[in-house]
Image (tube, rainbow, N blue to C red):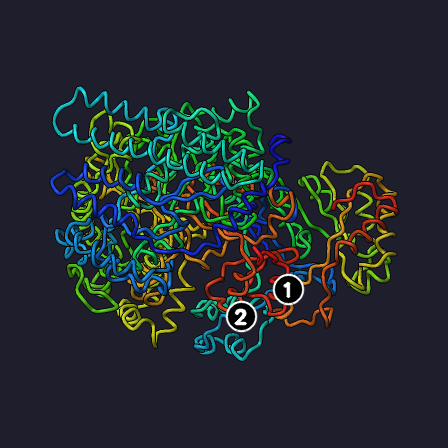
């Protein structure tokens, strides 16, 4: 990193704005819901896409807005920050059920105003009954979805499909005026259905222009009462930006960042979906940055200040989920995912000064958003790698790392062009996409392989309730060999995949009918060209991603059955079945044997890791025969966000020694926590046995380190070597939790969950949980990251 | 005749992958059992005795009693002994009770491995060694099982790996010379300068150690040599000792690399498992930065120019 960048300071104004933001209470807002409902009521005869366009335009024209004088980047989708937006087009039934409990529910609480609840029940809810996405899906396909719910969690049932990376570059180059002209030109020469599509694009662009002008006017109003000359000057510049952007494309860096934020605020206004991803900001913003630097209108410090103002904006939009979904995706992962570094479309290293500035902003703010990712490849410069590690060591878990050497080949295997694959970005948490041209539908469903194994071992019956959920193909006692068991398992997987595909199709169809998205479509390649909405398959690429849950528990369970029941016969199949049915009560010796006498995934034991990989391959292969509703491929991912907890609640006692309803392994590719006893290199070797293409939709590997490791330059060097090998091993993803004091206190209290946690002791590394009390305290005292 | 790598076996009490503190890069540490010294503060007390022991981990035990029903050793372990010394002919018998334990609460304190087995284990991480890393032999005193250690070093070198050793130098000059020829890095421990004190606290005189050190520092080996003194309160960490060691080695070689290892209080945890009394009733703390600077100054004043901090 050059000296100028190393000397960058924390901007003062950002601290002020951050404090204001965090002090504001989080409320549920029904303002936009009223505007949408009114619009729909006024235009009962228009098609879905025009209704949606008119609703968005009205919201852009009439929603109340606000700014702070210190802001260099303005705009939001609601007047207050971090509001839970009620969005009736996608679903009102669950809000009707849960409105009162929002302030007290266990995860992701919101304050509510009593008058809003009343207005919602009186004016909004009645109109949307059986019209919203949620109700449409429920009426058309609800019972089928419920029937498989313990095995397959079908997503996007009550909210619009996000998880998409728009073509920000196009937006910056054209702006709303340019896109409006593009659509007008197409409209002039087109006939049929596409006419409404282009009309809708024009409507929402007019709305966008007016939205920007409203901010321009508001800032000028506020300028009257501001006396600080420095702030006044910035306010004028910010107001000018808003006016300029409503009329022409972005020219300066400051304008480009403001323009980017308007794009994302409006995308959220249109769809209220999870994750619109800015993607490769250091690439498409670079020309603006460089030009301003050259003509001397900004310096690096100013660029950083602008970026940090944008970073705050990323934290002002949260996403209101139903309580069930909040358990799966806890803590508002809204998914402004930014990918730093990586390669250019023609395969050269893409690192530039902005890559470092984006990392610096993360280092200063340590807020949950953006979700910062660094793309690594064989030729990633050492400085970028080291700077990333330094930011990781601060303990926010970011940046996370993606591996071009794994991701790019996995993408081209799906038929994505080499150029597009080289240019990949990330949406949501770890889902992979090509930017600006891909509706990846990456969270189509989560498939619980461990539940299917349970049904295979127990006559198709749920171990928790005894209810028949799948065909009865026998149980562990009736299978005469491990191969027979595997054959039955494969059959059950096929059975549930078939049901899942039908459900996914029903969901996609309902999205086409209820949630066409003209604004989003205008920034996704091929939609404008084809005159076809993105939900209907207008994008250049159309995938559906299914998550395999959870390979670690599955490999551990199958390895235990193979070794202890079939190979060594140390446990009889009858005993195993009884132990599972009893949740191990009275079968403690059997459980101890399953836990301790069978090898576990994540320890670099080839046959165990291969068992996991084999079933992931089988699943992936089976899926590859299907096409989604938009004509695209299904593919697989291995990540859970927080879903390993609720999905674990659905699974009875398992042959890996896990008690009924306990969480599954976290991450997606990670070993079960506490079972990886051979250290981090063994974990990487194990994970590398999962082929690249199994995680073309995204993989997640979690690792935990003590902060001590990062305290010396030598530690950082070794960490960088570790990551270089991670790149060589073609593992798609890794993220690091730097352990905090509380983690160690927890490890002391529940040692069984933390068996794999190691600490450096003199000439060797020891398991933390095996150290004497006093020494554990000593290490806890030394680990001073509790304050962060 | 079978190849030596399949024939020769040694007693290994631990193999640690991702060792990052001793030597360059990411390393695998191999801990060889047996040591001619018996330092009272030893960080790896289970590595001192060459004999195999049965170890019982009470915190893992689920009290099922299966071991007690299967063997005498199991029974005796179950009665809360934590460590039982085993004669050569007893080991096989003992393995039955280890095998029967569902909880993994019983184990031997070392395993007998062939050279091939050790090399295979090490090679699992070869892709991590690419960036500067390698293997470190540790112990115990790695040259105590010298036949095994020398053959192992030869095979590791043949596999193209960077090799390091942590040695007390209490070995014959001939063995040291052979080992040095196959090593890239030698950590030579020099604990106490005064011969009488050395004998009292480690059980042996340091005469041979001094001679071997001289040999190493007078240009007889290509290997990088780093002399180290572990700072053990009362035993090694006093001004006179640091001063004498520093003058002694810098007189032999003015640019000698010297490192003072801060006291690490965590070793105490192991003494419970070996049923021995730790050398401190009240475990001292690590030295502060100021105290470390004090020791560093003494070393520098006594002629050290190449101090590793």
Q: Position of residue A219 (x, y in %)?
A: 45, 38
**Closer to the camera: disc 2 or disc 1?**
1
Q: Position of residue A466 (x, y in %)?
A: 20, 69
Mark 2 element type: loop
Q: Taking A55 as reference, is A297 above or below it? A: above
> Pointer 2: what residue?
B57
For mark 2, name the chain: B
Mark 1 element type: helix
Quarter of the image for the C terminus of chain A: give it: bottom right
Residue A684 left/right relative to A4: left
Quarter of the image where one finds residue A581: bottom left
Residue at 48%, 55% (x, y): give it.
Answer: A23
- Residues tagged by mark 2 and mark 1 found on one chain of the structure: no
Quarter of the image where one finds residue A251: top left
> Pointer 1: what residue?
A778
Residue at 85%, 56% (x, y): give it.
Answer: B241
Residue A240 left/right relative to A148: right
Task: Categorize mark 1 by other alpha carbons within 10 Å: few (<14), some (14-19), many (20+).
Answer: some
Residue at 44%, 38% (x, y): give it.
Answer: A221
Mark 2 to mark 1 CA distance (whole Å): 22 Å
Q: What is the number of the mark on residue A628?
A: none
Q: Taking A107 as reference, is A491 above or below it? A: above
State whether residue A626 appears in this view.
no
For mark 1, name the chain: A
Residue B74 left/right relative to A600: right
Quarter of the image for the N terminus of chain A: give it: top right
Residue lying farthest bottom? B79
Q: Taking A293 as reference, is A673 above or below it? A: below
Residue toward you, A585 or A338: A338
State whether residue A486 appears in this view.
yes
Total marks placed: 2
Residue at 34%, 36% (x, y): give it.
Answer: A211
């Amino acid at each position: 990193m050059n000296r100028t960048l190393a000397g960058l300071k924390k901007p003062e104004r950002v601290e002020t704005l951050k404090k204001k933001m965090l002090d504001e209470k989080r409320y549920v807002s029904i303002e936009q819901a009223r505007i949408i409902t009114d619009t729909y009521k006024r235009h009962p005869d228009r098609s879905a896409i025009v209704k949606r366009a008119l609703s968005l335009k009205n919201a852009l024209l009439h929603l109340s807005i606000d700014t702070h004088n210190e802001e260099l980047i303005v705009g939001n989708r609601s007047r207050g920050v971090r509001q839970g937006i009620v969005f009736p087009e996608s679903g009102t039934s669950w809000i009707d059920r849960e409105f009162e409990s929002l302030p007290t529910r266990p995860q992701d609480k919101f304050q509510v105003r009593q008058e809003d609840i009343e207005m919602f029940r009186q004016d909004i809810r009645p109109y949307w009954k059986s019209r919203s996405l949620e109700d449409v899906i429920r009426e058309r396909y609800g019972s089928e979805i419920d029937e498989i719910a313990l095995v397959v969690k079908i997503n996007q049932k009550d909210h619009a499909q996000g998880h998409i990376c728009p073509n920000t570059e196009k937006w910056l180059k054209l702006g709303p005026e340019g896109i409006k002209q593009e659509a007008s030109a197409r409209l002039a020469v087109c006939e049929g259905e596409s006419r409404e599509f282009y009309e809708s694009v024009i409507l929402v662009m007019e709305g966008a222009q007016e939205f920007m002008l409203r901010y321009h006017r508001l800032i000028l109003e506020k300028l009257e009462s501001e006396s600080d000359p420095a702030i006044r000057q910035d306010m004028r510049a910010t107001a000018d930006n808003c006016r300029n952007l409503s009329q022409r494309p972005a020219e300066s860096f400051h304008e480009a960042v403001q323009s980017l934020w308007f794009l994302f605020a409006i995308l959220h206004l249109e769809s209220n979906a999870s994750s619109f991803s800015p993607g490769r900001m250091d690439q498409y913003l670079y020309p603006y940055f460089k030009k301003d630097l050259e003509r001397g209108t900004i310096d690096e410090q100013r660029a950083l200040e602008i970026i940090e103002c944008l970073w705050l904006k990323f934290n002002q939009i949260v996403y209101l989920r139903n309580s069930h979904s909040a358990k799966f995706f806890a803590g508002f992962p809204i998914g402004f995912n930014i990918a730093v570094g990586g390669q250019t479309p023609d395969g050269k290293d893409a690192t530039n000064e902005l890559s470092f500035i984006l990392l610096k902003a993360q280092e200063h703010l340590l807020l949950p958003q953006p979700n910062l990712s660094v793309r690594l490849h064989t030729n990633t410069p050492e400085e970028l790698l080291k700077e990333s590690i330094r930011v990781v060591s601060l303990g926010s878990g970011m940046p996370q790392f993606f591996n071009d050497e794994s991701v790019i080949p996995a993408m081209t295997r799906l038929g994505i062009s080499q150029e597009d694959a080289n240019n990949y970005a990330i949406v949501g948490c770890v889902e992979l996409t090509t930017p600006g041209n891909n509706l990846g539908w990456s969270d189509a469903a989560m498939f619980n392989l461990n539940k299917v194994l349970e049904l295979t071992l127990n006559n198709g019956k749920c171990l928790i309730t005894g209810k028949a959920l799948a065909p009865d193909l026998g149980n562990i006692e009736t299978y005469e060999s491990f191969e027979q068991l595997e054959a039955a398992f494969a059959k059950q997987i096929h059975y549930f995949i078939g049901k899942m595909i039908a459900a996914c199709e029903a969901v996609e169809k309902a999205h086409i009918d209820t949630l066409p998205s003209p604004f989003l479509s205008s920034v996704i390649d091929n939609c404008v060209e084809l005159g076809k909405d993105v939900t209907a398959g207008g994008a250049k690429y159309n995938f559906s991603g299914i998550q395999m849950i959870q390979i670690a528990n599955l490999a551990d369970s199958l390895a235990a059955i193979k070794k202890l029941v079939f190979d060594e016969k140390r446990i009889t199949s009858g005993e195993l079945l009884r132990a599972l049915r009893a949740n191990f009560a009275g079968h403690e010796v059997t459980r101890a044997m399953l836990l301790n006498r069978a090898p576990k995934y994540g320890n670099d034991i080839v046959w165990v890791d291969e068992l996991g990989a084999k079933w992931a391959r089988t699943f992936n292969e089976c899926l590859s025969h299907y096409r989604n509703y938009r004509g695209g491929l299904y593919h697989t991912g291995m990540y859970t966000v927080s879903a390993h907890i609720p999905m674990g609640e659905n699974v009875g006692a398992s042959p890996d020694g896990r008690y009924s309803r306990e969480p599954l392994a976290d991450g997606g590719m990670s070993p079960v926590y506490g079972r990886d006893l051979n250290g981090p290199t063994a974990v990487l070797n194990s994970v590398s046995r999962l082929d690249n293409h199994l995680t073309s939709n995204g993989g997640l590997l979690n690792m935990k380190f003590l902060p001590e490791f990062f305290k010396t330059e030598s530690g950082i060097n070794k960490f960088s070597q570790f990551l270089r090998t991670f790149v060589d091993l073609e593992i798609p993803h890794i993220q690091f939790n730097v352990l905090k004091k509380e983690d160690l206190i927890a490890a002391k209290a529940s040692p069984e969950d933390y068996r794999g946690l190691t600490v450096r002791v003199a000439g060797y590394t020891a398991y933390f949980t095996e150290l004497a009390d006093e020494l554990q305290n000593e290490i806890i005292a030394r680990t001073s990251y509790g304050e962060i | 005749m079978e190849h030596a790598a399949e024939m020769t076996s040694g007693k290994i009490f631990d193999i640690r992958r991702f060792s990052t503190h001793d030597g360059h890069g990411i390393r695998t540490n191999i801990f060889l059992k047996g040591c001619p010294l018996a330092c009272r503060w030893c960080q790896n007390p289970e590595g001192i005795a060459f004999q195999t022991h049965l170890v019982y981990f009470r915190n893992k035990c689920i009290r099922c009693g299966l071991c007690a029903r299967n063997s005498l050793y199991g029974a005796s372990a179950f009665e809360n002994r934590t460590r039982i010394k085993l004669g050569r002919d007893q080991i096989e018998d003992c393995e039955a009770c280890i095998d029967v334990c569902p909880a993994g609460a019983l184990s031997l304190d070392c395993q007998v491995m062939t050279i091939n087995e050790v090399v295979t284990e090490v090679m699992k991480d070869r892709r991590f060694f690419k960036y500067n890393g390698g293997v470190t032999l540790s112990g115990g005193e790695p040259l105590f099982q010298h036949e095994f250690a020398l053959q192992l070093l030869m095979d590791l070198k043949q596999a193209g790996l960077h090799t390091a050793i942590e040695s007390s130098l209490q070995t014959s000059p001939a063995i040291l010379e052979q080992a040095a020829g196959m090593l890239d890095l030698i950590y030579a421990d020099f604990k106490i300068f005064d011969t009488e004190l050395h004998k009292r606290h480690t059980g042996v005189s340091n005469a041979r150690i001094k001679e071997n050190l001289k040999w190493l520092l007078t240009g007889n080996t290509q290997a990088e040599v780093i002399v180290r003194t572990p700072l053990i309160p009362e035993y090694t960490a006093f001004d006179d000792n640091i001063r004498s060691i520093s003058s002694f080695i810098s007189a032999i070689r003015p640019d000698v690399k010297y490192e003072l290892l801060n006291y690490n209080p965590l070793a105490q945890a192991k003494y419970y498992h070996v049923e021995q009394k730790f050398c401190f009733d009240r475990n001292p703390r690590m030295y502060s930065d100021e105290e470390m600077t004090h020791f560093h100054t003494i070393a520098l004043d006594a002629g050290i120019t190449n101090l590793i901090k």
